[in-house]
Amino acid sequence: MITENPWGYQEFREALADPAHERHAEILEWWGNNDYNPDSANFSQLNKAVDDLAAKWARKARRKI
């Protein structure tokens, strides 16, 4: 995966934004479309998704037998 580290994420952003980038076509195919804008994040949706995952992954209390 290209975005496994900060440098890969930076390359992902640069390649997706620049049609002349040598990896543009590859990353566009991997990503699925050219519609990526990290500045348009919906933080209420992101926070809800994190809260939902935290609830799902929370430790369950042991039942006494």
Image (cartoon, rainbow, N blue to C red):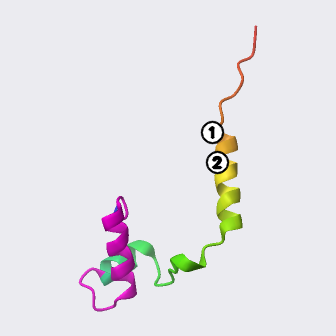
Q: What stretch is highlighted in magenta?
A: 2-23
Image coords of residue 47 (percent x, y):
67, 59
Instruction: Please tell me how crowded label 2 is: few (under 14), some (14-19), or many (20+) other residues with Cα within 10 Å.
Output: few
Asked if the residue at tag 1 contacts the one at tag 2, i.e. Cβ–Cβ closer than 8 Å, the answer is yes
Instruction: Please tell me how crowded label 1 is: few (under 14), some (14-19), or many (20+) other residues with Cα within 10 Å.
Output: few
Mark 2 → mark 1, Cα distance in angstroms: 6 Å
Which numbered marker is on residue 46?
A: none
Residue at the disc numbered 1: 57
Residue at 66% over, 72% down: 42
SS of the residue under disc 1: helix
SS of the residue under disc 2: helix
Residue at 34% over, 59% down: 5
Amino acid beneath label 1: Trp
Q: Is residue 21 magenta?
A: yes
62 relative to 35 in the view: left or right: right
Quadrant (top left/top right/bottom left/bottom right) for the N terminus: bottom left
Up the image or down, 49 lies above or below 57; here it is below
Up the image or down, 3 lies above or below 57; here it is below
